[in-house]
């Protein structure tokens, strides 16, 4: 996930209270028109926020070249006015969540692109300007979650907004629910994840990490906060230290909290969580990502920034030097239910993103040289696959499927890359 970034069963979302810097991070959160009326979680919201769905075939603006297998290349298949945030591949093809920005993203409209083949796209406007932190998931339906703001009371509140689509083209807003007031910072969300038991949203409090944890829903309409202890979160967690993925009929959540272990829990109904083990990562970390090939789980645990970074704009390449002091990214792979092996080599990157393409696992992170890519067929044997100059851009999301991966920046730079499996 980036500044504010996302299979039909329960849904889970992770929420974090953002500091004041949230408004600067989100390209649309500071919009002066972003004034909303809040509604209960079970209510899709007032009718005046409904946006008619437009399913328009957007012609490819320039020919989409076929990238050389095994290398990243710029992707030119999205409309020029579209700024992507997150993507997911499901049985009905790709959905990319982002913004249509005419002409500035201060007025960006939440938009979903759908494609069967990853080359030809149709567009649907799913919300109105002012909603940020978009992420997308698949669980037999497509889900998009974002953050809105309610300015109607004496305090500004963050509000989670959720949409559902059965085909990636027609979208329905299913919920708006309050995340809490903006005090020292505004609450926000991490990524949305879906599984057989429903949907999960990661709730983040960037000021008081003890408040962070997931919300769950069976139908995407009524949302309930999960007790952090049920998913192994002790003493709170940092934003980015929780991630979830669907495997079989379960939703799997990995979280690294104040206790220096990463816990992995599974649920088939979003209510009862069973332990799949604790990964001894050797100290507190603030970045956790998880992916699956359908039979095994791969968890990568590391850092998102150096202990000297204050989030004031230092580039990923600059604060990646933390690797030299605090370690890089450690990878664990499940070999049986509840049994894990640690990859023999720690990767010298931080701010890692992980995806499965259908053929291999792809991990991208930053080090002092730029954005480094590593690939693995089994989650244990990792091969370096090149380093790209990355400058001050952050890594937002890596999404895989159909034998390819998409790489998005975190909103600071208009970068979209794609990679086809060798």
Image (cartoon, helix red, strand yellow):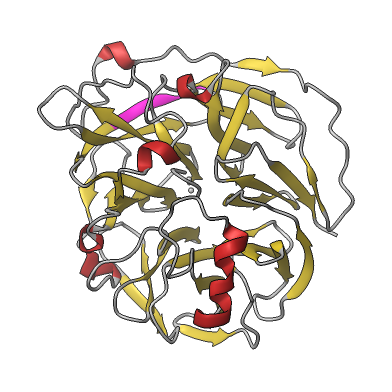
Q: Is residue 16 above or below residue 183?
A: below
Q: Position of residue 10 (x, y in %)?
A: 35, 49
Q: Is residue 288 left or right of residue 227?
A: right
In the rendered view of the protein, which quadrant contains the C terminus?
bottom right
Q: Position of residue 99 (x, y in %)?
A: 53, 27
Verify whether residue 174 appears in magenta: yes
Q: Is residue 331 above or below residue 184?
A: below
> Looking at the image, which residue sits at the far left?
154
Q: Position of residue 239 (x, y in %)?
A: 37, 58
Magenta stretch: dominant secondary structure: strand
Q: Is residue 207 above or below residue 82?
A: below
Camera-nearest residue between 334 and 84: 84
Q: Is residue 342 left or right of residue 121?
A: left
Q: Quadrant of residue 237?
A: bottom left
Camera-nearest residue between 64 and 92: 64
Report the span colored magenta.
170-175
Count of numbered labels shown in the rendering: 0
Verify whether residue 216 appears in magenta: no
Residue 329 seen: no
Q: Is residue 332 left or right of residue 205?
A: right
Residue at the location (42% across, 53% down)? 196
Residue at the location (29% across, 55% down)? 214
Residue at the location (61% across, 48% down)? 393
Q: Position of residue 308 (x, y in %)?
A: 44, 68
Residue 410 seen: yes
Q: Quadrant of residue 48?
A: top left
């Amino acid at each position: 996930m980036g500044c504010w970034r996302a299979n039909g069963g329960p849904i889970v979302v992770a929420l974090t209270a953002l500091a004041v810097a949230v408004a600067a991070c989100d390209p649309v959160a500071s919009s002066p028109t972003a004034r909303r009326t809040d509604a209960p979680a079970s209510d899709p919201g007032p009718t005046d926020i409904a946006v008619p769905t437009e399913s328009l075939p957007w012609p490819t603006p320039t020919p989409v070249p076929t990238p050389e297998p095994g290398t990243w290349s710029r992707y030119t298949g999205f409309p020029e006015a579209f700024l992507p945030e997150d993507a997911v591949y499901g049985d009905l093809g790709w959905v990319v969540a982002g913004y249509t920005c005419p002409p500035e993203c201060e007025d960006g409209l939440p938009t979903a692109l759908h494609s069967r083949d990853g080359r030809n796209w149709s567009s649907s406007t799913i919300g109105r300007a002012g909603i940020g932190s978009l992420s997308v998931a698949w669980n037999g339906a497509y889900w998009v979650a974002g953050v809105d703001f309610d300015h109607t009371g004496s305090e500004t509140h963050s509000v989670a907004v959720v949409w559902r689509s059965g085909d990636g083209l027609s979208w329905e807003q299913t919920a708006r629910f309050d995340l809490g007031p903006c005090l020292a910072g505004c609450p926000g969300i991490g990524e949305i994840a879906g599984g057989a038991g429903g949907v999960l949203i990661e709730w983040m409090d960037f000021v008081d990490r003890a408040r962070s944890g997931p919300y769950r829903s069976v139908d995407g309409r009524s949302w309930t906060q999960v007790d952090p202890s049920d998913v192994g979160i002790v003493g709170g967690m940092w934003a980015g230290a929780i991630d979830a993925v669907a495997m079989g009929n379960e939703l799997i959540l990995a979280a690294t909290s104040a206790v220096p272990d990463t816990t992995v829990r599974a649920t088939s109904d979003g209510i009862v969580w069973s332990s799949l083990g604790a990964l001894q990562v050797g100290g507190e970390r603030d970045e956790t990502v998880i992916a699956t090939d359908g039979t095994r789980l791969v968890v990568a645990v590391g850092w998102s920034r150096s202990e000297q970074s204050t989030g004031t704009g230092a580039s990923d390449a600059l604060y990646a030097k933390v690797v030299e002091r605090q370690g890089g990214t450690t990878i664990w792979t499940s070999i049986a239910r509840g049994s894990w092996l640690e990859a023999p080599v720690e990767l010298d990157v931080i701010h890692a993103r992980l995806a499965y393409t259908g053929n291999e696992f792809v991990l991208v992170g930053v080090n002092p040289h730029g954005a480094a890519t590593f690939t693995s067929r089994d989650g244990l044997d990792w091969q370096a696959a090149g380093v790209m100059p990355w400058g001050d851009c952050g890594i937002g999301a890596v999404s895989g499927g159909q034998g390819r991966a998409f790489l998005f920046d975190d909103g600071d730079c208009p970068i979209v890359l794609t990679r086809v499996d060798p």
